[in-house]
Amino acid sequence: MIEEHIAGVPGDMFIREYLNQPGLNKVRIAKEFIKFNERNFIRLLGDMRSVNYVMDITPDFEEVQYRVRAIDFDQQSYEGKGNVYQAFRFKSNRAVTRLAFAVLNRKSIEQYVAEEHSQMSHRAKVENVRLRALLGVMRREVIAPREHVATLAGELDRIHGTHDFHACQTMGDLTARHITLLLGIPLGDVAQGLS
């Protein structure tokens, strides 16, 4: 019943029924999926296989606009494996992942990732009070088993080539550090509001 009221085409249906339609702007689809993947990774929203998101399709004057929106949030900052937070790694997303790598070069992908970082950084600055409050609660509450925190800390250190995550005690610590590292927000600036 609830899913009937969510605007958009379920991801699995979009991949199955829309992705190979003639006239589809594959570059726009690829761009949006790259940005969606990055949004999930930055905020550590996991399990974005194709049944857990929708494709919002909006006709525009010249082109059709696409926006991928998550609809399942039960794996927010919970899992210990880093690849769970990367939508392109799921088998059910393989067709759209292949499309993205077929129509975009590495430079374009990096540009779209940078654009998403810039947009999210701007949002984080505009909503810094709310973000700090949310991350503060996440730091104080046990939202994931300690083993998941330790495993993810090691994986994030490996992914980023740092040792910044090993001292994190909670998923809130990890999420705050991850967001500040990826968005270029000074760690001390965020940490003040979270302790």
Image (cartoon, helix red, strand yellow):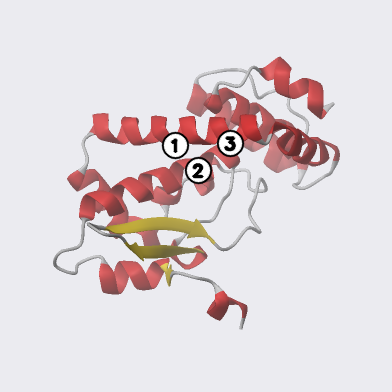
Q: Nearer the viewer, residue 127 or 168?
A: 127
Query: Label 2's element?
Result: helix
Q: Secondary structure at mark 1?
A: helix
Image location (x, y in percent) of residue 186: 64, 17
Looking at the rendered structure, the kind of residue marked 1 is Glu
Q: Residue furthest front?
A: 61
Residue at (49, 58) in percent of width and height? 69
**Is tag 3's residue or tag 2's residue first in the polypeptide sequence?**
2
The answer to the question of whether label 2 and label 1 lie on touching residues, with beta carbons closer than 8 A, is yes
Q: Which residue is mark 3?
A: 123
Q: How many circles with numbers are drawn on the protein?
A: 3
The numbered mark, 2 or 1, whose residue comes first in the sequence reads 2
Distance of label 2 from label 1 (alpha carbons): 7 Å
Horizontal side of 151 relative to 48 (left or right) equals: right
Graded by Cα atoms within 10 Å as few (under 14), some (14 to 19) or many (20 or more), the crowding at tag 2 reads many
Task: Name the foreground residue: 124 vs 92.
Answer: 124
Apparent side of residue 99 relative to residue 91 in the rendered image (left or right)? left
The residue at 65%/24% (across/down) is 165
Tell me the kind of residue under disc 2. Answer: Arg
Name the spot of residue 132 as percent of width and height, x first.
75, 33
Residue for badge 2? 39
- Mark nearer the viewer, 3 or 2: 3
